[in-house]
Image (cartoon, grey):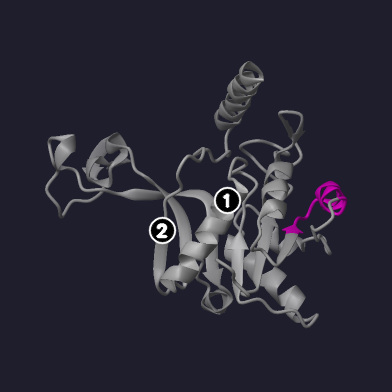
Amino acid sequence: METNKTILAIIPARKGSKGVPGKNMKLLGGKPLIQYTIESALKSKLLTTIVVSSDCEETVAFANTWEGIEAPFIRPAAIACDETPSIEVMKHVVKFYKERKMEFEYVCLLQPTSPFRSPDLIDNAIKHMLKMDADSLTTIQKTPDKYNPLWAFHLSNGQLSRFISDVAMPSRRQDLPNSHYRDGNIYLLKTSLLSRNRLLGGRCIGYQPENEIDLNINTLQEWKLAELYLEVYSKGEKSQS
């Protein structure tokens, strides 16, 4: 599927991280975490422009060593806080390019915390969104039964109350309705949604990846899982060679 749509990919890489300090430039399998996302974005055939938004000079310098990657500014401190929503970062990038006479029909958010997304996943998600004529898309995974919202609880002062109280709780997992969660790999939306402060809005659809690693690194435990995956993958590659 050929497309002439203009798509701006944004790789957000804030300096501060409480779960895994300095994670974007921390070495995973011998290379900075952010490099995995940079490499997959560069191999995509449908992204028009790829930009790294960071408040970290080291990250910006690293991004600018890659042909095809733009990192034209240091992200302002006002939108580089723990509480800064992704939508504000995206609006800042879009405004930066608009002031330089560059506008895009779509924005694609690629977070470095999902290092194992493939270039095919990026392109297939874009194709699916265009085919469905949707306004926004996010990649999703089926929720494991034990985490189904109908089996979830609030805990307050040691007391449990059901997360969803107006629907009967099934006693068997076979009776649970299907539910899905955002896996963090890709957020794709029409640029016009940004003015409504919506990351997902309008006609929003999900795209469930096939044969993709579902790992979003926000804790040291998840970092160790990523290292384990790379170790197992490396051993598998060597055994086939």
Specify the amino acid type for callout 1. Answer: Asp
Q: Residue 30, how many percent across, how many down?
A: 76, 29
| Circle 1 or circle 2, nearest the eye | 1
Q: Which residue is found at the position 16% from the left and 38% from the top?
A: 174
For residue 220, above or below residue 112: above
Q: Which residue is mark 2?
A: 206
Does the image show residue 13?
no
Q: Is residue 184 magenta?
A: no
Magenta-tinted stretch: 52-65
Tell which of 57 and 153 is nearer to you. 57
Q: 238 or 62, which is in the foreground?
A: 238
Does the magenta-highlighted stretch encompass residue 54?
yes
For the residue labelled by badge 2, is the local secondary structure a helix, a strand or a loop? strand
Would you place residue 136 above or below residue 119 in this image? below
First in sequence: mark 1 vs mark 2? 1
Residue at (44%, 72%) from the top-left corner?
134
Q: Which residue is label 1 attached to?
A: 120
